[in-house]
Image: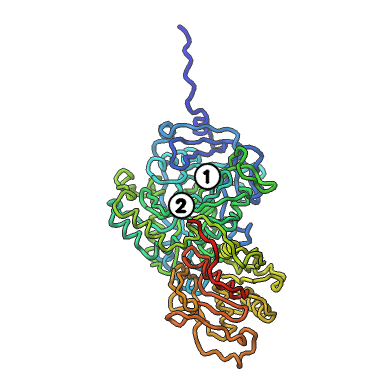
Amino acid sequence: MPHTARPAPQHPLLDRVLASDGSLPFALLRRHGGTEVEVLTGDVVDADLLRDIPLDGAPVLAVVPYRQARERGFTVQDDGAPLRCLVVRESERLALSDAVAALPPEPVAAGPLGFDIPDDEYAGIVRRVIDDEIGQGAGANFVVMRSFEARTDAGPVPTLASWFRALLTHEVGSYWTFAIHAPAPAAAVGPAAGAVSLAGATPERHLTLHDGLARMNPISGTYRHPASGPTREGVLEFLSDTKENEELFMVVDEEMKMMSALCPDGGRIVGPYLKQMARLSHTEYLLEGRTTVDPRDALRLTMFAPTVTGSPMENACTVIARHETRPRGYYSGFLALFEPEAAAEVELEPGAAGYSLDAPILIRTAYLHPDGRVSVPAGATLVRHSVPEHEVAETRAKAAGVLASLGLVARGAGPDAVVDLNAQPGVAEALTARNHQLAEFWVRPQEAGESPLAGRDVLVVDHEDQFTTMLAHQLGHLGMNARVVRWDAVEDVLADDLVVLGPGPGDPRDQEDPRIAALTRRILERVTAGRPLLAVCLSHQVLAGLAGFPLRALPAPRQGVRLDADVFGTTAAIGYYNTFGAHLTTVSAAAADNPVARLALEPSVDTDGVLTALRGPGVASVQGHLESVLSADGITVLDTLARHALGVPGRVVSGGPAR
């Protein structure tokens, strides 16, 4: 009888992964809602810094922990979680249907233990963050994590493979669905000696780079689907909710700071869109711009997404360290897939690797720890309008999609039971209406026009809020040569034609704060020398205090709101991020003993008696954030105030957003 050869497996690499004993590193990926699954294996190496990720010609998948924020000098609870890299040596692609058929049909058994922080305790943390942080000027919004815990006796391969199939089957709308198992390299010690094992369905892109085009994808605002399924009425109510709107605009502002640092020509806002998942829907924008930096440096410049940390970024990390009870591990970090790119159309910086980058944020993810513990972390974005009980419910809802897919909570109605929210009457119009609040400067391509300010050198001092990168970009649009220097690295405050003292978190009255003390010294030094000065937000408040105007906390923080402000007789739509304000009162310059008060600055005030701006010889200041995406009139006011400080006549800059 003739021998009949058995057909070769259609997915030999996936078969090897599924048959392995846990010693084989692997990644299973479905990206961008595609119709294929990628299977990757290779060598595992750990890197200390992002720049150490080995880009030597092979694709690399890196799992980046939250502790890498220390590369930017930010405060973190350092748990030693490794920056683990899979250097890809073998790969295959197979149809989604074939992958689903080959994977284990049901999730492995696991015993749920509940949230590590009980509901009432988490609600207490929310109240403290609102009162003690947002209410004291620490920032506009913060994300605080808690984690659902479970246990399993199953090994990593069946656990992750079954989780991956369940997420493919039960979740919709994901940017990446993935399962990754990366055993420790032989030389690893301490916390890095264990395997890194995780599976998830993340909705959010952090950063992509391809042919010099950078894209970020801030997602914020959460519509929790009722058990009976989402409705048109429910999503329209969500889209009109003030808290949800402000939450999204705040994270767009924060990511535009990153885009301004990453892209010399600035970024552009596209959207908004509604992202529908199985149990939740979110609103999102797409930000894009051109860059020439190495993709590893691009990741360092954008660590981490404000949607999972807060703003301003540096102080958000400090607040997280104060209020979270355990280190974050990989939650709010990202995956980063580097793939060799054919000769790019743009010229890269010297030494930059010729790789594309696809980096999703690590949320909606389950982690299998070496001791059998399972954790599914989730966080809520806390803003001034937050209701603690609602934020408790939001963490449950965000974890529920993963938990239900893994069988740790009841699944309820699946994706097939819901309506397409984007197709409902009124949804597209409600999304478009959000853009009425945005500055056209950041929505349309930016073309610099001629300006009499051109050629002047500007020092922008950063007081731990990267809004300064957006300010510098706008000043460059006005023709000036702007550079940003952190407050503790400024060496000479007198040399530049104009100094712009930027915003920052904190209480402007606190002279024990080194930033406030340095800010005060620089204002006095610049004013005494008669050199042009422009102060923004926190710096405006310190300037106003020196001028004799009392500084007080506002009855309610103005964080992430757009107001129609009176700026010396002109009404301007400006975005605000302040908890404190300077108040109008009688100022006696003769009684003051500092050069700022003797200038007798002219105040501009709102209807509540809070100063919106100040001006005097060679000096101007403004409370609002002219650079914010909420500041429809920001570029015009910035031009006017910069001209005043520099003594340049005229009010309106030539050129502007391209139409």
Judge from the rendering whether residue 372 lies leftward or rightward of residue 400; answer left or right: right
* 591 and 367: which is toward the camera: 591
Q: Residue furthest top?
A: 1
Circle 2 packing at 10 Å, graded few (<14), some (14-19), many (20+), is many
User: Amino acid under label 1?
Assistant: Ser
* Residue 589 in the image, given as x and y percentages of width and height: 59, 90
Question: Is 370 situated above or below 312?
Answer: above
The count of marks equals 2
* Residue 591 in the image, given as x and y percentages of width and height: 60, 93
* 222 and 610: which is toward the camera: 610
How far apart, in angstroms, are the residues tagged by discs 1 and 2?
Answer: 12 Å
Question: Is 118 situated above or below 428?
Answer: below
Q: Earlier in the sequence, mark 1 or mark 2?
A: 1
Q: Name the residue rendered at 39%, 36% in the picture.
A: 105
The label on residue 45 is: none
Q: Name the residue rendered at 65%, 69% in the picture.
A: 487
Q: Which residue is mark 2?
A: 376
| Among the 4 quarters of the image, the one containing residue 454 | bottom right
Circle 1 packing at 10 Å, graded few (<14), some (14-19), many (20+), is many
Secondary element at image label 2: strand
Question: Is 349 situated above or below 628?
Answer: above
